[in-house]
Structures are given as structure tokens and as C-alpha cells.
Amino acid sequence: MESMALWIVLAMLVLFVVLMLSGRFDFAGVGLTCLTILVLTGVAPISQALSGFYDKNVVMLVGMFAIAGMLGQTDFVEKIKDMLLSGGGKKGASNLRIMFSLMIIAAILAQFTTSQSSIIMIMMSFMLTICNESEDIKLSRILLPLTFIMTSWMGKLPVGSTGATTYLMLNQFIEATGETRLLDIFSLMKCTLIPGIVGVMYSAVTYKWLPKKDVDVSAFEIKGKGGSSGKLPKDKQIIVYVGFIVSVVGLFLAPSIGESAYFVPIAACIVMITLKAMDRQYFLNSIIKGPVLMCATIMGIANILTDSGAGNVIGELILDLLGGNPSGIMIITVFAFVTLITTSFISNTATFMVFIPIACNVCAAAGIDPRAVVVTIFQCSLLSVITPMANTGAAICFSACNLNIKETIKQTVPGAVLCTILVIINSVLVYPF
């Protein structure tokens, strides 16, 4: 019975991908259809199917998406937009400068928080206005590359809590096999810095490979007298600034104050509505027209797939594929690319949690140093934004920009494959077999 349930889940995954590749259906409709089938067939309980609707990231998205639109109606964002768009020189050079600036900011933020969705919404608050003023740099082109940079640079430098402690978690898997060669606090940086830099360069140059779409921001438009668009009054702008700052600080402090921090943006919206800095209908429109419903359904499917045991099945297939006496290069290459593919559909945490223990045991049996393999698996679990199920950030990007896998694959797949190859090379140079 359990095997039948797994096959049904995998069949729904194939159906989801096929319908998305067709380009004829929206994510919310396809997601709800797949969730309905999974519930009616008894594969997933209703609570699990609806888990995306009360996921902490979706809750945060409700408030931050509305605040992002409000911030776009302030003088501060207007000044940032002018600063980024007034670079002088040739148009192409100016666009490249803007892209590098945004990506460097994203990479820096990724050192201090593991919440991709938080960083995306913080940056989207500025980009909604900037992208509307640029002919080439559209939200549909920039948001996915930015998510790739945020994810691939997550905790790369040993400065934040993630970068300073991840190696300790990975060492637990290594030590469990009796191995004494362990990672140090600089291991992740040493093994992934080159791929990270190349990833920034690749994304800054290839963003034009993504579709140029005018994202519907009608839910964020604030009308002045006579129906014309207008800036918020100065006193209301101050309220928006305070609400934005409080929300951002709350999200960054989430590891300390708990998951209740994800409700801070909604609380800020309630205060803004009470003080008449935000219109109640505007807030409701941002939920209805925004990516909330699409993200919730996508995350529901991803959660079901993660809990189905698909990762363990894939792990067993890897062991069969490697055979009896595999070389170190074969082990690291197989695990790297299988991780990249798997993390496109299953939670990155679940992916490396399943694959790293298997890889450590394979390395122990083969008598080789496991460190390069462990770091590679961990980093490759962060390299995919190929599908909306890859991570929360990807779900927001595909939903907010109405992107289709068929439209994005020519940019996302080469970047992920390139960085995967470079991670393998970089890791083996640091920790040779």
C-alpha cells in the first residue's frame, strides 16, 4: 500500500511538471488539481495537502507582499531607483552594473539569514519600482537569478549563524562512520567560493535569457485624486518606513524569537490599515492578485513529496548505480548531479539529510576522504531554482512573475550544471581523494 502511495505521488509530480511545461495552465490551478487528486485517493491527508497555506513563509508573504507595494509609493525607494538607473555610460553597461549591485546585496544578506523568502521580499520592495522604470531589467528576469544567488551563497562565509555552524552539523554525519578527517569552519567557503563567484557572473550576464514580462502590479497601485497615481503623504510614508523596518528586523531575529516573527509583517499591515496608511481593500487585493495562493499549493505538493519517502528510494538507486568498488570521482559526480535533480522537487534539507549519510558510508567502504563529497552534496542541494518546488524562493519567483518552467529552463539549467561541475572541481582540489 505504501509503495502504491509513493507511485501516485510520483505520478502527480510528473503531471505537475508536464502541465507546467505546456504553458497553458497557471500554477494555482495545477497545484490545486494535484492536491485534490492526492487527497481523494487517500495518499495525503487534508492537513498535509493544506500545509502550504499555513506555512510560515506563506504567512510572511501575505504581509510582506503588501508592504512591498506600499514601499514603492515612497520617496526613499524613488531615490534608490534614481541612484541605480542613473549610472551614465552605455545602456548595457548600466544594466550590468545594476545587476551586479543587486546580486552582491543579495549575497551579503544571505550570510545572515536562512530565509530565502525574507530576502526576496525585502529586495522586491525596492525592485517593484526599479523594474517598472527599466526597459530590460524586469522583475520576471531578475527575481529568479537573484534567488539563485541567495540560495547558492547561503551561509558561505563564516560570519552568520549558518556559516559558522553548518560544518559542525556536517561533521556529525562524517564522525558517525568513524572517520577522523573532519571539516573546519572555512571548509564551505574554500570549496564553494569559486562556483559562487562564477554564479554571480553567469546570472548577471544571462538574465536576458529569461522572459521579459510586465508583472501585474495593479494590486499595488495607489490612486490620487482624479484616479491618477500618486505618492503617499509624508506622514503616511513615515508609517510605511517604520512598518517595513520592524518587519525586516523581526524576520532577521526569527531564529531568536521563534516562528511568531513571521506574523510581524501582517501585524505591521494591520497597524498601517488602522492608521489609514494602507487601504484595507489594497491589502486584500495584494493577497488575491499576489503569489500567495500559488505558493501555498506548490509548497503543499513539495511537502507531500518530501514526506513520501522518495528521497530514500533515490538513495537506494544511487547505491545500486555505484556498484561494488566506485572511484572517488565517480562517487562525488553521481551524488552531485542526483542531489541537484532531487532538490528540484524535494526540500533541500531533506535531500542532503538523506544523501549525506549514504555518501559517508559509501566513502567509508571505499576508503576515501568523505569531506569533498559531503560539502558537494550540501552545496548542490542549494543550487536549484529550476522548478517552483526547488525551494520557497523559487516558488515565490515563479508565482509572482507568472513564469513557466519551459520559459526559464534555458537559463536555470546551464547555470545549475555549471556551478555543480565547479563545486565538484573546487571541492576535490581542496580535499583530494
Image (spheres, helix red, strand yellow):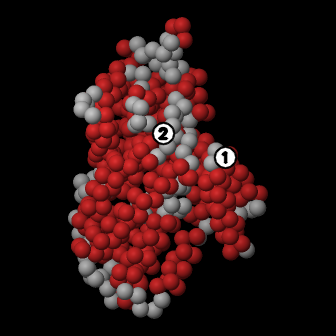
| Residue plotted at (66% across, 70% down) | 6
| Residue plotted at (30% across, 57% down) | 198
Q: Residue furthest bottom?
A: 324
Q: Residue furthest front?
A: 90
Which part of the image, by quadrant, shows the N terminus? bottom right
Crowding at label 2, few (<14), some or many (≥20) Cα neighbours within 10 Å? some
Which part of the image, by quadrant, shows the C terminus? bottom left
Q: Nearer the viewer, residue 414 or 38?
A: 414
Whether pointer 2 and pointer 1 mark residues with C-beta atoms closer than 8 Å, the reply is: no
Residue 165 visible in the displayed image: no
| Mark 2 vs mark 1: in front | 2
Establish if 80 lies above or below 227: below
Q: Nearer the viewer, residue 135 or 416?
A: 135
For residue 276, side relative to residue 206 (left or right): right
Q: State the image coordinates of residue 30 (x, y, percent, origin top left).
A: 67, 50
Residue at which label 1 appears: 25
Establish if 429 lies above or below 414: below
Residue at which label 2 appears: 212
